[in-house]
Amino acid sequence: MIKNKVINILQNTSDISHYEIGVSVSKEKIVTLTGIVEEWKDVVNIGHLVANVKGVKNVVNDITSKDVNIKEVNNDIEIKATLDKGVKEECDVVIIGAGISGCSIARSLSKYNLNIIVLEKNGDIGEEATKANNGNIHPGFLAKPGTLKAKLNLRGNKLYTQLSKDLDFELKRPGSLVVFHNESDVKKFKVLKFLKKTGLGYFIKSFRQYMKTPGLKWLSAEEVKQKEPNLRGNPLGGFLMTTMGIVEPFEVCYALAENAIANGATFKLNTKVLDIRKTNGAVNEVITNNSVISCETVINCAGVYADEIAKMVDDKFYTIHPRRGAIAIIDKNRKGFLNTPSGVLGRSDRSHNSKGGGASVTPEGNLLWGPTAVETHDKEDKSVEASDLDYILNLGQGVTDQVKKNEIITFFSGIRAADYKEDFIIEASKKVRGFIHVAGIQSPGLAAAPAVGEMVEKIVLKQNRLITKKLNYISTRKRTPIFRDLSRELQDELIKENPNYGRVICRCELITEGEIIDAVNAPIPATSIDAVKRRSRAGMGRCQGGFCGPRVLEIIAKELNIPHTEVTLKGGDSYVLHKESRS
Amino acid sequence: MKIIDVDVVVIGGGPAGLAAAIEAKKQGTKKVMIIERDTSLGGILQQCIHDGFGLHRFGKQLSGCEYADNYIEELNTYDIEVAYDTIVVEILKDKTVYAMNKTDGIIEIHPKAIILAMGCRERTRSQAFIWGTRPSGVLTAGTVQRYINIEGYLPGKKAVILGSGDIGLIMARRMTLEGIEVLGVYELMDSPGGLSRNIAQCLVDYDIKMHLSTTVIKTHGNSKLTGVTVAKVDSNRNVIKGTEEYIECDLLVLAVGLIPENELSNQLELDIDPLTRGPIVDDQFMTSMEGVFAAGNVVTVFDLVDYVSLTGEIAGAGAAKYLKNELDLKQEYLPIKSGENVSFVVPQKIRLNNLSEELPLYFRVRNKQEKTEVGVFELENKIYKKRHRVVLPPEMIVEKISTKLIGEINTPLVVSVKEV
Ligand SMILES: Cc1cc2nc3c(=O)[nH]c(=O)nc-3n(C[C@H](O)[C@H](O)[C@H](O)COP(=O)(O)OP(=O)(O)OC[C@H]3O[C@@H](n4cnc5c(N)ncnc54)[C@H](O)[C@@H]3O)c2cc1C
Ligand SMILES: Cc1cc2nc3c(=O)[nH]c(=O)nc-3n(C[C@H](O)[C@H](O)[C@H](O)COP(=O)(O)OP(=O)(O)OC[C@H]3O[C@@H](n4cnc5c(N)ncnc54)[C@H](O)[C@@H]3O)c2cc1C
């Protein structure tokens, strides 16, 4: 049945009908595709087409394209090295990946008497999608009704208020504004209002998500002007989603991890999962570059690599197709120019599968433009291209034409880990006991993170009803002092207590030596210049580390007691200095 | 919190701040204080170990450090307080200055006059719009200079330099001497950004090639820089397709320009000149706020430190006069405007009553021109002229105008450069 439908659609879609695509369907309704096509975009198009066929649970897309060359990963040599080394460890739960998903799950599970190890291949947590996103706690309005991400988005958004209090990270709720310039849009939004007020929207499936979203407001032209006077042109009206929040995403990720550590979880950085071994249909051992860890539960939150991790236990029923998103940050001179993340109806390219984008704001007050959405075959492709910036400028300048290109202080990319159903996959493996999938966590993965943790917690509890709660669970966490936020009097006191807070290292963001030393000695130590930046903001300002880079490098070297030449920008072999000149 | 009262506070102890403090003192100011965030005085000069400084000022070629030392020695003969390792973090509109350091904590300073001398900063990678990944090995020229000259480390083995500003040129030579292979200097514009003498001494003498109308469009490598893509650009600075070339290197040095350091000026909401990107100043180098002066690279980026010192002296003297109530603060300003082929003029406005015998004008041309004449006009009336064999955008022009001639008619002065 499904197979015929799939073949049918492949044969009847122009552009791709000439390709020979192999189709097989499992009894779980997973479709596996094989074949060779000309371009990568065809691979992605075919994957999406098939995933949309009614009844298809998911798609494993093994089609290759002639324009790209994807290397087969083979970890055999490294696995052997670990086995030879013979280091063995034990725990109850292994979490693979310390992004926002893994850290949220670690915190949720750290309430229980469980021995938890979080494995992260990078030298720092949150270094992938989690550090490179818009930081929006979406209201949940735009998510496709009926999807898991729609449900978890709403729930996550709600949980953020308490979470930010418990974990002492900054959460603002400026709301999110969509403005319109066309009479027809004014009408559309009037209809929406009617549907919402009367409750009639519940009867229309495509409106259901929107009916569930709390805190919606309709603004007149004057109210829009009053709220955001610097918007381009004269919008005819606006639609305000008051529950939209903004956070510094890394800060949230870090707070979750730190709290999990306070409750006994262990984080192992620079530790890459190479293989997972099963016995009798249950997970048994996780092999990393450092050791072999025996455990009962493995939670796969490996972001773009989640499909490869699933393959290790022979339960790969989805393919992750990376989608790059570029973002630009505007100089702080524009602080207050826009206070509500805003978008203009009809401006962003809604044909793609990611959140609309426009002009957002960071908690610090910088304008943030983007993101783009570009399908790429390369899971490590964090580049920004000229075409990305053109798109971003178009988005941003649709919102306000006063901010100019030369006010951008930095731009960067992150990669969304999308599957072909374009939804989150969070479930216990049906094939392997103890293995839990947390995959396809693309946007709104940040907004949903607290709910993802909650959901996985339930799955784990269901699998093992004997798990007990910790008596001494610590539910809160306090951050180290943030010098720039204190009053002059308190700053003075802090310096008297610890003179290191009296020397400014990052002049743009007013970050002191004390804060950098705190970052290097944090529970998850910052060992690279970028890691220090994420924890302390040193280097995030307009000179982008030009001034403080050498000074931060020196502090890292001193605190970690390593030579200057071993300090990296971002872990791995990203050394900043080659050698001493006077040796 | 420590509270201090002073007559003049100078923010920044580079050549501009040193000259300003000395001059303010010489002119009879009682309490002069310099606040410097570094542990020593001299500013950027401390990392300039090459020579070529002071030709105008001292009549000989000094290294940057030697040039600064001359001033520091002079400073030491005066009773001028210097707060080292102390950074100014905020200035309120009532002129309260907040500074901080490790030993005193927060310091609240109440000065009668302020001289801003914070220097400039370098433009970054994003400001140059280079695409691609963000690996290590992409550094500004000033940072490379600091690593090599002050800290004693080499940041790479094979370098490409983007931008032909003076610091880039000087670093081309410096890196070559240190054994880093310099693969070329790439310049977006169709003419070099640095002084001709630096091109001769730093590139030609070392066989380093300069590629004009060519730029770095992309960096490669996810972790450590593995190479860059360069490409030619057309007259509109758009990349010409098909001219892309990959160059393997592990260091990209950015010498893509300097911008006045104006965090503090912005806090004070001083009027900023969009052309210089520094505060608008008058003949005393006083900004749009009475009693707040500015000198050196804070005002506009100078290419010779000699001129920086001069502006420091003017501002220092101005502050002293201000404190002695010798300045007319009421008279209408006469604007000074950029005419033909002039990209900016400093000072931007003058008060006739405050002028001394000579008025120095600092300006740059937009385009290279040969056989030219600089003219200063009051309407049709040419009150000053000077011939130049050639004028180039990177080389600042300084003309000293006899003030007797100014102000016959009450109209703006216009500075123009024309072919003759
Ligand atoms: C441009 C952009 C903008 C976005 N904007 C928003 C937004 O505004 N709001 C929102 O809610 N969401 C947004 N998102 C989505 C959000 O960023 C992600 O959904 C979220 O960060 C995913 O977190 P994660 O922990 O699942 O994945 P990741 O952060 O990618 O973490 C996965 C981790 O697993 C590790 N790993 C992988 N393989 C292995 C292995 N073999 N061994 C050990 N470790 C491994 C990785 O190193 C990584 O640290 C955006 C995404 C992008 C790209
Ligand atoms: C990297 C670089 C290399 C250069 N190389 C050459 C060269 O080779 N030849 C040449 O002729 N010119 C060169 N110049 C230009 C020349 O050095 C400058 O013209 C001159 O140093 C400018 O003097 P200044 O006093 O205005 O600024 P600076 O020398 O930059 O001094 C500014 C001082 O202010 C201090 N400061 C800034 N902000 C604060 C604050 N908030 N609180 C306290 N203190 C503060 C700084 O620490 C610094 O000491 C170079 C400039 C740069 C940036």
Image (spheres, rainbow, N blue to C red):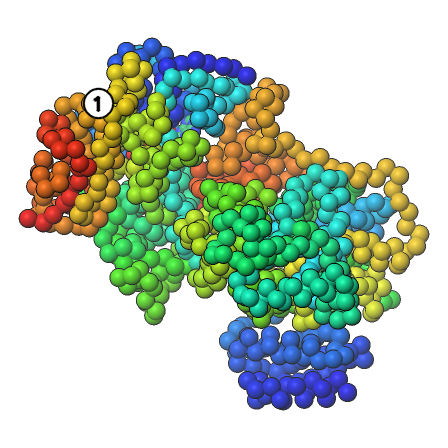
Nearest to the observer: residue B11 or residue B286: B286
Q: Residue furthest left?
A: B420
Residue B228 x/y as whole percent: 40, 58
Nearest to the observer: residue A236 or residue A528: A236
Image-based side of A354 in relation to A450, left or right: left
Q: Secondary structure at mark 1?
A: helix
What residue is drawn where x is 82% and y is 53%?
A457
What residue is drawn where x is 75% and y is 82%?
A25
Residue A212 vs A57, above or below: the answer is above
Residue B188 x/y as whole percent: 30, 55
Q: Residue furthest right?
A: A466
What residue is drawn where x is 44% and y is 26%?
B93
Residue A294 vs B291, above or below: the answer is below
Residue B100 x/y as whole percent: 50, 23
Residue B297 x/y as whole percent: 31, 34
What residue is drawn where x is 78% and y is 70%?
A203
Quarter location, residue A150? bottom right
Nearest to the observer: residue B77 or residue B6: B6
Nearest to the observer: residue A563 or residue A42: A42
Residue A214 vs B7, above or below: the answer is below
Check the residue under mark 1 and report the chain it is in: B
Which image quarter holds the N terminus of chain B?
top right
Task: Identify the residue position indicated by label 1 in the image.
Answer: B354
Image-based side of A336 in relation to A469, left or right: left
Say which amino acid is labelled 1: Asn
Image-based side of B109 in relation to A109, left or right: left
Judge whether residue B149 can be spotted in this image.
Answer: no
